[in-house]
Image (spheres, helix red, strand yellow):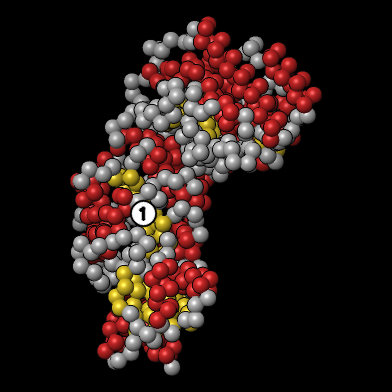
Amino acid sequence: MNGPIDTNSWQYRQINARAPGLSYLANALIDLVEDGYPVVAGTADLQYSNGLVRFAQRFPERFTQFGISEQNMVSAAAGMASTGAMPFVATFASFLALLCCEQIRTDVAYSALPVRLIGHHAGISLGFYGTSHHATEDLAIMRSIADLTVVAPADGPQLAAAVKASVNHAQPIYFRIGRGQEPVVYDDGVEFQFGKAIIHGEGSELTIIACGSMVHPSREAYRALRAAGKSVGLIDMHTIKPLDTKAVLSAAAHSRFILTIEEHNIVGGLGGAVAEILAEAGSPARLIRHGIRDEYSLIAPPTHLYKHYRLDAAGIEATVLEALG
Amino acid sequence: MANAPTPSNNALPPDAERIALLRDRAEFVRLETLRLIQIAKVGHYSSVFSCAEIFATLYYDAMRLRRGEPQWPDRDRFLMGKGHAAVGLYPLLVDWGFFSKDVLDGYTRLGNPLGDHPDMRKVPGVDFSSGSIGHALSGGLGMVLGGRAANRRFDVYVLLGDGEMQEGQVWEAALSAAHHKAGNLIAIVDRNGYQLDGQVDDIIGIEPLADKWAAFGWQVHEVDGHDVVALATLLRQLKAEADRTRPVCIIAKTSKGKGVGYMETEPGWHLGYLAPSDEALAAEEIKRGGKTQ
C-alpha cells in the first residue's frame, strides 16, 4: 500500500553512506514502537531523504506514504493524533513550515493534538537545490504559533534523545533537523530535556548561543578560542520555544557579548528570541545575531555556503574575534 | 452516473417511527439555529438549513454514538469542512448529553466555548476543529488511518461544502483516501449551489462533480439531501456493505435556506440576522413545512 522499497537505489544506500544522522530518526521511532508506544509515521514522497524508509520496512502497517501532499499529511496527522496515535510526519522544513503553516496552526497546535512535525534539510543544507528548498524562516514562523514546542537538535544522538523524550510531552512539536551529514556533537544516549539548554562552558568576554547544525562548528570555534586564551562560553539552545531564559540571562550577566548562531534568517529565529529576552530584561550585554542576514541565500554546495556565510567553524571564530576587537 | 453504486440489500429502510424522529430532529436543528443566532445577532442560517436533514440522519440513524460519552474511542466520527454550520450541530450534541444546555444558551458569549466554528478542545462531541475550509477530509482520513493502526473500526463522516470543492487540499485527500482504501471514510457534499460571493457554478464551477469523485477512485452516490428516507437508507446500505475498500462520496442535492422560503430564493442569506418578529415568522414556516419532507 505504501509502495515498494528499492533497497538497491542510490537513495537508499546514501542513508548509511552519506547521511548517517538520518538513521537516528527512524531507529528512535522503531524503538518507541517496540517499547509499546502508539507511534505512526508518514512522509510526503521523501522516505529516502529522511530515512523513514527504515521505519516503513520495519512497521509497514504504521507508516503512511502521503505522496506529494504535504498539507493533506499534516491535517491527516492531526486526525491520527485525535484517535490516540502518536504521529511523526516528515518533509523538507521549507515545505512543512511555509506550505503547511496554517494546517500546523489550526489543525495541530490550536487543536492541541500531539503531532510531531519533522522538518528536515532545514536552513541552507539543500545547497544548490535553491531557495525554494532552503528554510531560513521556519523557526520564526513556528515560534510564533502558540502551544507549539520548537526544537532544533544538534545531531543524530540528540535528535534520537529528543524524539524519545517527546513521548512524555503533551504539546505538539516542530523538530528542525539538518540533512543527516552534521558531524556528531554528542554521544549516543545523551540526555535531553525540552526547554533546558546545554551549557558547554562559560566565558566573561562572549557567550555563543547556537542551535541545531550550528552547534558543532560553534563548538569547534569555542575550543579554538579558549585554546587561544579567550574567555568564551557556549550554550546549545536546542529548544527555541520555550526558550531557556534563565540560561540566556545568566550568560548575559557574566559576558560582555552574546553571539547567536543559527542556520536561519537573523530575523525572528534564535537571535530574535534571545533579543526579546535581553531587551525585556534590560541586559547590558551586547547582542550580535549571526546567520543569514535577511536575504535569500545563494546557491552552492552546502559546505561552500557555510563558508560563504561564515557559518563554519572558521567563520564563527572570525566573527567572535571581530566582536572582541 | 459515472460510477454505479453497489448498494447492499441487507439493510432495511428506516421505519415510520424513525422517519418521524429524523424529521423532528431536522426541524429541531432549524428552530434551535434560529434561537441561537438570536443571541449572536448574526449567523449562517441558510448554511445550516441546507444540511439539517443530513445532521439529523447522521446523529439519529447512521452514527454509532454513546449518550454522554463524547470520547468513546469506538464512536463514529463527524467532521465539518463547512464549520460555519456548527450552530446547527451544537443542539444535537446537547441532545446526546455531551454538554449542558446552559452552555448552549451562552452561544458566542465571552468565555463560552461555542463559536461560529467548532473547536474540538472546547466542545465535547466535536471531533475535529474547523474554520479553514479544505482541511476536514484530510483530518477524516487521518482518523481512518489512526483507527486502522490501533485496530479500531469506526466510520468517519465528513460534511463538505460544495464551494469547498474549490480547495486543492480536498483533492489531495481524495487521492490519498482512495489509494489507502479508506472504505470507512464517507464524504457528504452539501450541494446547495451557493458560496459567499454567489452561485458556485458562477464563481468557480465544480461540475461534473460526480465524475470527478469517481475518477478519483471513490464510490459516488447522488441523493436528495432533504429526503431523510433516502439519506438513511443509503447510509444503512453503505454500512452493511461487505467490501468497504473504496471511500464514499455522497453528493446531497440541497437547497440553501431550506425551510424558509425567502432564504431559499435570496442568496444574500449566507450570513444574516432575523429581527425577533421575522424570527417568529420563520419559525412558523419551518414548523409548517419541516415535517412534510
* Residue A306 falls left or right of residue B279: left
Residue at 46% x, 34% y is: B127
The residue sitting at the top extreme is: B16
Residue at 77% x, 20% y is: B281
Residue B191 drawn above or below residue A42? above
Please name whichever residue, A98 or A165, is drawn nearer the observer in this view of the structure.
A165
- The image quadrant that residue B116 belongs to is top right
Residue at 40% x, 20% y is: B239
Quadrant assignment for the N terminus of chain A: top left
Residue count near mark 1 (Cα–Cα under 10 Å), binned few <14, some 14–19, many ≥20? many
Disc 1 marks a residue whose amino acid type is Ala
Quadrant assignment for the C terminus of chain A: bottom left
Q: Position of residue A145 (x, y in %)?
A: 50, 56
Q: Which residue is mark 1?
A: A90
Q: Position of residue B81 (x, y in %)?
A: 54, 37
Q: Position of residue A69 (x, y in %)?
A: 43, 49
Please name whichever residue, A266 or B257, is drawn nearer the observer in this view of the structure.
A266
**What is the chain identity of the residue bearing mark 1?**
A
Residue at 51% x, 72% y is: A281
Residue A118 drawn above or below residue A64? below
Note whether residue A294 is visible: no
* Residue A236 falls left or right of residue A75: left
* Residue B90 falls left or right of residue B275: left
